């Protein structure tokens, strides 16, 4: 079953920084990789991905950057393929054309 996932730019940036392999990403490393994103936007986007179930975390409440730095994150494996398609929408169209052609 294909899920239609729509992501904004901040969510895409976070998912690319984490990687879609399902490997754990330490919060401190994630914060370093994101760089220029505003703290409030970063926390909002990350909490949104967690609440949707796309990202799994070892902590429930992430209210500050210290909470993020002490956490471990990974992309939920059950959404990985759909998230990959949402990040690269041209790839999905290309695969559809190949199947039809």
Image (spheres, grey):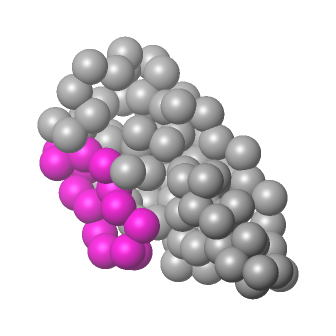
Compared to residue 9, the image places residue 87 above or below, namely below
Compared to residue 59, the image places residue 36 above or below, namely above
Residue at 61% across, 34% down: 8
Residue at 34% across, 56% down: 18
Q: Is residue 47 visible?
A: no
| Residue 18 as seen in the image, left or right of residue 61 | left
Q: Quadrant of residue 28?
A: top left
Q: Is residue 93 visible?
A: yes
Q: Position of residue 49 (x, y in %)?
A: 58, 48
Magenta stretch in the rendered image: 17-30
Q: Position of residue 87 (x, y in %)?
A: 54, 51
Q: Residue furthest front?
A: 101
Compared to residue 64, the image places residue 40 above or below, namely above
Residue at 58% across, 73% down: 81
Question: Of residues 24 and 97, which is closer to you in this image?
Answer: 97
Q: Quadrant of the C terminus?
A: bottom right
Q: Position of residue 88 (x, y in %)?
A: 55, 53
């Amino acid at each position: 079953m294909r899920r239609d996932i729509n992501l904004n730019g901040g969510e895409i940036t976070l998912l690319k920084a984490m990687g879609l392999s399902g490997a754990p990403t330490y919060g401190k490393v994630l914060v370093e990789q994101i760089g220029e994103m505003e703290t409030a936007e970063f926390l909002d986007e990350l909490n949104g991905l967690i609440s949707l179930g796309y990202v799994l975390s070892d902590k429930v409440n992430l209210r500050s950057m210290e909470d993020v730095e002490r956490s471990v994150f990974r992309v939920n494996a059950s959404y990985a393929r759909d998230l990959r398609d949402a990040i690269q929408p041209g790839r999905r169209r290309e695969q559809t054309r190949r199947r039809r052609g």
